[in-house]
Image (cartoon, grey):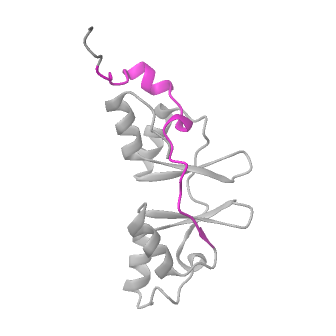
């Protein structure tokens, strides 16, 4: 029997031209504008360190990060009394699924972001991509397996 091939890491050229769609996570926990801060904190504990905020048509309105919730606590608010609208960062950075990983790396580094929402042409959320997704792809040479 021939030896099994190891998964090879993506080479610099392959990696640069791969797209966000190939590595983004499509199972994203989201909040609405009126979702309470304590509910958002619970979503973060179970999932990502930031939660996209959507309107009724899945349009990206903002994002709530751990930093935003800690700011609310530091300002003396109880998380059960504030909403996503109160604490979110409006008009957050986002990328399209056809964005190359080379471009994404530049955006992540220049903005010091950990993760970025992925939106379609109507600004509707379709996924999220994080630094670790990019690094996993570079090291592992493959796309993320969907759940």
The stretch of residues the image draws in magenta is 6-32
Indicate the quadrant where residue 105 lies: top left
Left/right of residue 44 with respect to residue 93 in the rendered view: left
Nearer to the camera, 33 or 42: 42
Residue 23 among magenta residues: yes
Name the residue at 73% across, 67% down: 56
Quarter of the N terminus within the rendering: top left
Q: Where is residue 98 in the image (x, y as percent from the top left)?
A: 61, 34
Left/right of residue 42 with respect to residue 29 in the rendered view: left
Q: Position of residue 43 (x, y in %)?
A: 46, 69
Q: Position of residue 119 (x, y in %)?
A: 64, 49
Name the residue at 43% across, 46% down: 108
Where 47 falls versus 26 (above or below)? Answer: below
Indicate the quadrant where residue 34 lies: bottom right
Q: Where is residue 74 in the image (x, y as percent from the top left)?
A: 37, 84
Name the residue at 46% across, 26% down: 16
């Amino acid at each position: 029997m021939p030896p099994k091939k190891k998964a090879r890491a993506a080479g610099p050229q392959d990696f640069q031209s791969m797209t966000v769609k190939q590595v983004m996570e499509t199972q994203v926990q989201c909040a609405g504008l009126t979702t309470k801060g304590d509910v958002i904190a619970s979503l973060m504990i179970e999932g990502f360190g930031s939660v996209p905020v959507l309107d009724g048509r899945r349009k990206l309105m903002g994002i709530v990060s751990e930093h935003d919730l800690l700011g609310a606590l530091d300002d003396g608010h109880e998380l059960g009394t504030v909403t996503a609208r109160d604490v979110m960062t409006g008009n957050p950075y986002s990328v399209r699924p056809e964005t190359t990983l080379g471009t994404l790396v530049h955006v992540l580094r220049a903005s010091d972001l950990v993760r970025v929402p992925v939106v379609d042409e109507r600004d509707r959320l379709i996924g999220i991509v994080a630094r670790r997704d990019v690094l996993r792809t570079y090291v592992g040479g493959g796309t993320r397996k969907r759940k």
